Amino acid sequence: MKFREATIADIDQLSSVRLSVKENTLSNPAFVTENDYIEFLTQRGKGWLCEMEDRVVGFAIADLQEENIWALFVHPEFEKKGIGKKLHDRMLDWYFAQGKEKAWLSTWPGTRAEEFYRRNGWKEIGITKNKETKFEMIKTVWLSR
């Protein structure tokens, strides 16, 4: 298992992981474009990935501009190996080191992702207009874990 910063050269594999998930699927894969990945990786924030056998099996991207977590996905074949947790922790360590005081994210209710975020200290703060559960992480909570 190798973790590293994601680059533009990884976008095809990041997209492949994103489209492989069974929960929080995209209703239309065209909603997330190559240009979106480029913007989030090079202008708005930073991303990390996990590789196994030269294959990207998970990734996470933080967005400093909107102060949120844009993506955290693990390919279904590689779930329950701690990949998501390691990506999550690296991402939040970096994110809060950038001087941010809080971050938010949203996910579909009743999913394993929702439970993952609860277990990792995220607090539910409402429901989005798309009916997703909205969570928040505060820097002081993250640093005191």
Image (cartoon, helix red, strand yellow):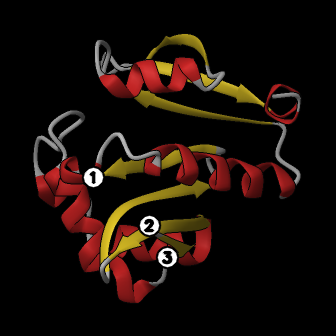
Q: What residue lies at 24% left-to-right and 66% top-to-bottom?
A: 15
Task: Classify mark 2: helix, strand or loop.
Answer: strand
In this rendered view, identify the residue nearer to me: 49 or 78: 78
| CA neighbours of label 3 inside 10 A, class few (<14), some (14 to 19), many (20+) | many
Task: Classify mark 3: helix, strand or loop.
Answer: loop
Circles 1 and 2, Cβ within 8 Å, touching? The answer is yes
Q: Position of residue 81 (x, y in %)?
A: 39, 46
**Relative to residue 7, is residue 102 drawn left or right?**
right
Q: Position of residue 38 (x, y in %)?
A: 43, 77
**Relative to residue 19, is residue 58 drawn left or right?**
right
**Relative to residue 140, is residue 66 drawn left or right?**
left
Task: Tell me the residue that label 1 is attached to.
Answer: 78
Height in image: 68 above or below 98?
A: above
| CA neighbours of label 2 inside 10 A, class few (<14), some (14 to 19), many (20+) | many
Looking at the image, can residue 40 be seen?
no
Task: Tell me the residue that label 2 is attached to.
Answer: 50
Q: Position of residue 63 (x, y in %)?
A: 59, 55
Question: Which residue type does callout 3 highlight?
Answer: Ala
Q: Earlier in the sequence, mark 1 or mark 2?
A: 2
Mark nearer the viewer, 3 or 1? 1
Q: Quadrant of residue 111?
A: top left
In this rendered view, identify the residue nearer to me: 75 or 102: 75
- Which residue ends up furthest to the bottom in the rendered image? 9
Question: Which residue type does callout 1 highlight?
Answer: Phe
Q: Quadrant of residue 80?
A: top left
Task: Tell me the residue that label 3 is attached to.
Answer: 6
Q: Earlier in the sequence, mark 2 or mark 3?
A: 3
Q: What residue lies at 48% left-to-right and 72% top-to-bottom?
A: 39
